[in-house]
Image (tube, rainbow, N blue to C red):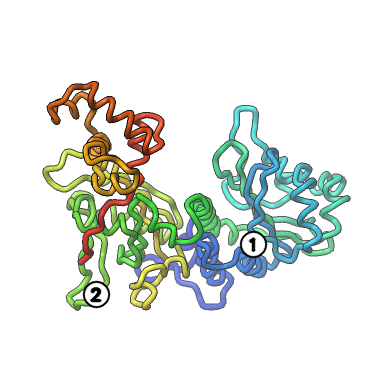
């Protein structure tokens, strides 16, 4: 469900909300969540904004595996500092709302399709008698609740979002639950982005170090940012290209598929990620005449200031919502032998063999191409493995595939 499903129809069927309405505030919040995921804003600010939008007294969001004792608190709005450590260190193991979504015997995590009330998981009478409520939650006003438990993969990895009111407060309404459900696709996308960027580094600057091609695009595929791998891919015109979107020389660059047959699918992929908060994938055909494997493209939503990582958006010519498009080339790349020699201290012959192996040839083919015996090449391979620290040829291929390639100019 997206915001376009919940509001009055505007041009081209897109929902239109009055500025200041609760729906408009939640749409703005979607951008703030993605900013927080990309390290461009504070998770605490996002939590405070969400709590006020739903008119809750407190709000919490954490991710992790509570049974393994790994819990990362993303935000806690209006929760006293003194209450955080007891929950992380002890009470999370007795949280009846989380326990109600515990993995069944076959694995996985029980989740509702959208936001639900606390009493949907645990009857209020049972919750009020629980040790968790008596010894912990009652003191900080956690009684009425609306939220969601989102699985993050890895069996017990979960992301529980909870908004609360004390026992003396009013219960949450169906309207408030529906508004939170409308936000969920954007929240899930932000959490996926948070986990991804946490693994490779903080913020969008880490994308420059990635071997994957990374584009930040708005819903019309206008370019806001491209890392070095993306610039190489677009300059080669193999799978995707960047073209001017209009006659003026400063018109924004637009990403298009190299093959006309993939044009509509690529446009729909980016639009779904940017406008509907979905993460979607696509296989893109190569340029005409190439028999290499299809490119693998994955688009995930990216809103707010995080979408302004590139100059075109930052200068105001484009506006979010936007999508982060990652494209991987499954075909092995051949690194420059000179770079390998400098990086690992290889001899010219060893560097050339390493580059050839990274390009997909086997030892026997390398020996035949060089006019030497297989044992000679195997001896050189052993020296290459020793100097690079790779354990075997497959490990060497993985190591060399992660190296950046020379960057051609982007016109």
In the picture, measured across the screen, residue 193 lies left or right of residue 328, that is: right
Q: What is the secondary structure assignment of the residue under circle 2?
A: loop
Give the residue at mark 2.
251
In the picture, measured across the screen, residue 98 lies left or right of residue 303, that is: right
For image coordinates 84% across by 63% down, the residue present is 168
Q: Is residue 186 above or below residue 287?
A: below
In front: 25, or 399? Answer: 399
| Quarter of the figure with residue 42 | bottom right
Q: Position of residue 320 (x, y in %)?
A: 41, 69
- Looking at the rendered structure, which numbered label has been put on residue 110? none
The reply to whether residue 185 is in sight is: no
Q: Position of residue 331 (x, y in %)?
A: 26, 40
| Quarter of the figure with residue 325 | bottom left
| Quarter of the figure with residue 387 | top left
Q: Position of residue 333 (x, y in %)?
A: 26, 43
The nearer-to-camera label among 2 and 1 is: 2
Per the model, the C-alpha gap separating discs 2 and 1 is 42 Å
- Looking at the rendered structure, which numbered label has been put on residue 176? 1
Q: Residues within 10 Å of mark 1 (few under 14, many from 20)?
A: some
Q: Residues within 10 Å of mark 2 (few under 14, many from 20)?
A: some
Q: What is the secondary structure assignment of the residue under circle 1?
A: helix
Q: Position of residue 185 (x, y in %)?
A: 51, 55
Q: Earlier in the sequence, mark 2 or mark 1?
A: 1
Locate the C terminus and report the quarter of the image it occupies: bottom left
In the picture, measured across the screen, residue 216 lies left or right of residue 24, that is: left
Q: Is residue 22 above or below residue 156?
A: below
In the picture, measured across the screen, residue 105 lies left or right of residue 359, that is: right
In front: 84, or 14? Answer: 84
């Amino acid at each position: 469900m997206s915001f376009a499903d919940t509001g009055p129809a505007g041009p081209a069927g897109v929902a239109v909300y009055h500025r200041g309405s609760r729906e408009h505030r939640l749409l703005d919040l979607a951008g703030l969540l993605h900013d927080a995921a990309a390290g461009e804003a504070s998770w605490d600010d996002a939590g405070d904004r969400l709590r006020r939008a739903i008119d809750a007294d407190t709000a919490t969001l954490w991710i992790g595996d509570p049974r393994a004792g790994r819990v990362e608190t993303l935000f806690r709005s209006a929760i006293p500092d003194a209450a955080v450590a007891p929950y992380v260190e002890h009470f999370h193991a007795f949280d009846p709302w989380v326990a109600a979504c515990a993995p069944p015997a076959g694995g996985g995590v029980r989740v509702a399709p959208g936001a639900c009330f606390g009493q949907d998981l645990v009857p209020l009478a049972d919750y009020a008698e629980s040790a968790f409520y008596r010894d912990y939650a009652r003191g900080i006003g956690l009684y009425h609740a609306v939220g969601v438990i989102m699985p993050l993969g890895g069996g017990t990895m979960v992301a529980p979002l909870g908004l609360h009111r004390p026992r003396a407060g009013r219960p949450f309404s169906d309207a408030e639950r529906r508004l939170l459900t409308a936000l969920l696709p954007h929240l899930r996308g932000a959490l996926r982005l948070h986990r991804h960027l946490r693994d490779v580094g903080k913020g969008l600057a880490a994308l420059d170090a990635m071997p994957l091609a990374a584009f930040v695009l708005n819903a019309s595929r206008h370019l806001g940012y491209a890392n070095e791998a993306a610039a190489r891919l677009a300059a080669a015109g193999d799978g995707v290209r960047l073209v001017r979107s209009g006659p003026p020389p400063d018109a924004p660059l637009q990403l298009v598929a190299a093959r006309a047959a993939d044009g509509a699918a690529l446009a729909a992929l980016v639009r779904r990620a940017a406008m509907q908060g979905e993460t979607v994938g696509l296989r893109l055909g190569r340029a005409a005449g190439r028999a290499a494997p299809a490119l693998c493209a994955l688009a995930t939503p990216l809103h707010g200031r995080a979408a302004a990582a590139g100059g075109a958006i930052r200068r105001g010519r484009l506006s979010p919502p936007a999508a982060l498009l990652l494209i991987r080339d499954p075909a092995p790349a051949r690194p420059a032998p000179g770079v390998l020699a400098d990086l690992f201290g290889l001899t010219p012959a060893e560097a050339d063999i390493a580059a050839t192996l990274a390009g997909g040839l086997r030892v026997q083919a390398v020996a035949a191409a060089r006019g030497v015996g297989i044992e000679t090449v195997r001896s050189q391979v052993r020296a290459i493995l020793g100097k690079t620290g790779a354990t075997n040829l497959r490990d060497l291929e993985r190591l060399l595939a992660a190296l950046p390639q020379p960057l051609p100019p982007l016109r």
